[in-house]
Image (cartoon, rainbow, N blue to C red):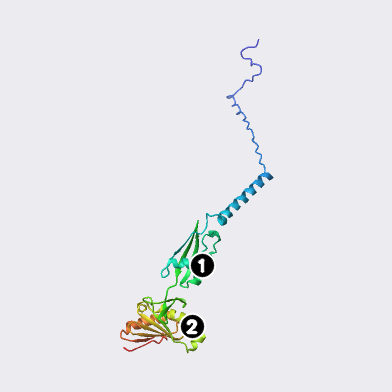
């Protein structure tokens, strides 16, 4: 019989130190395998057919249905012209599919029929409206046309004829019929030169400008409201001539005639 100090079978007695910690239990994780299948031929065919049907439906909505057709044309930005005049000249295809409207052709037709229009933006406003945003030309000078007046814009273009002269717009007289300048530069260029001169005139005198007379490219004369005249010469050196003229008007308040055709050698007379 074993004594009390005898170790039990299967046990090991530690001779020194605390008992060692037991290793943590191992955990087992299960793995989930995902299988990704490539779409089969049947699924691909269904997808393609669906896309084709959707595209065909979109085309039908845009061009064949009654949902997106032109029902209204609206004009904005007019000053002298009326919106009704612009809409009538546009001659937009009513009841046509809005997507089929040729906006460039419509804008070209408007500018050809109404030369007063400088620019026009044609926009589709879904679902059924065409918008016409108009910018009109503004008269810088007037030319007599019988009992009426032809308006000349900043580009020297005669764009419209009116029965009454717009207030505050100077008159342009072209007396260059026998001048070599007419054959060398042409009427359009001489008109542009006149507009340039009127635009370069000092702001304090521009409101008094009544007439621009063009005898040749180098002989442009201005007539002011109080009877004073300005020999401007050509349209070249316009900014420099304007500064010289402004100084002369202040220095010689009683003068009736100013010559700035050669800005480095100006002259006054009639004081």
**Residue under the point 37% across and 80% down:** 209
Left or right: 48 as drawn, with respect to 154: right
The answer to whether residue 49 of the structure is visible from this angle is yes
Q: Are marks 2 and 1 in contact (CB under 8 Å)?
A: no
Q: Quadrant of the C terminus?
A: bottom left
The residue lying toward the viewer, choosing from 203 and 215, is 215
Residue 71's spot in the image, x, y percent? Answer: 49, 59
Q: Quadrant of residue 165?
A: bottom left
Residue 126's spot in the image, x, y percent? Answer: 50, 57
C-alpha gap between disc 2 and disc 1: 28 Å
Query: Circle 1 is placed at which residue position?
Result: 107
SS at circle 1: helix
Residue 177's spot in the image, x, y percent? Answer: 47, 88
Q: Quadrant of residue 259?
A: bottom left
Q: In the picture shown, does residue 135 fall above or below 229?
A: above
Q: Quadrant of the N terminus?
A: top right
**Residue under the point 63% across and 51% down:** 52
Foreground label between 2 and 1: 1
Query: Circle 2 is placed at which residue position?
Result: 187
Specify which label sits upstream in the sequence, 2 or 1.
1
The residue lying toward the viewer, choosing from 209 and 71, is 71
How many tags in the picture? Answer: 2
The answer to whether residue 39 of the structure is visible from this angle is no
Check the image and name the residue furthest to the right.
41
Q: In the picture shown, does residue 57 fall above or below 184?
A: above
The residue lying toward the viewer, choosing from 246 and 128, is 128
Any mark on residue 15, and which? none
């Amino acid at each position: 019989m074993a004594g009390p100090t005898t170790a039990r079978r299967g046990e090991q007695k530690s001779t020194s130190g605390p008992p060692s910690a037991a290793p943590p239990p191992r955990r087992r994780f299960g793995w989930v395998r995902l299988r990704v299948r490539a779409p089969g031929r049947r699924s691909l065919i269904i997808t393609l057919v669906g896309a084709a049907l959707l595209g065909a439906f979109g085309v039908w909505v845009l061009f064949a249905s009654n949902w997106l057709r032109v029902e209204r044309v609206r004009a904005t930005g007019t000053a002298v012209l009326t919106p009704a005049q612009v809409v009538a000249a546009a001659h937009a295809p009513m009841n046509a599919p809005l997507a089929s409207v040729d906006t460039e052709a419509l804008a070209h037709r408007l500018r050809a029929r109404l030369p007063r229009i400088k620019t026009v933006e044609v926009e589709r406003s879904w679902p059924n409206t065409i918008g016409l945003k108009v910018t009109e030309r503004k008269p810088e000078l007037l030319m007599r046309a019988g009992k009426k007046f032809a308006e000349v814009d900043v580009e020297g273009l005669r764009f419209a004829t009116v029965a009454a002269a717009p207030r505050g717009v100077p008159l342009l007289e072209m007396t260059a019929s026998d001048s070599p300048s007419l054959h060398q530069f042409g009427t359009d260029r001489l008109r542009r030169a006149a507009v340039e001169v009127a635009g370069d005139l000092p702001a304090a005198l521009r409101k008094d400008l009544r007439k621009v007379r063009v005898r040749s490219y180098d002989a442009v004369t201005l007539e002011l409201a109080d009877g004073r005249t300005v020999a401007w010469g050509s349209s070249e050196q316009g900014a420099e001539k304007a500064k010289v003229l402004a100084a002369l008007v202040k220095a010689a308040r009683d003068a009736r005639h100013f010559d700035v055709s050669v800005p480095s050698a100006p002259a006054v007379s009639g004081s």
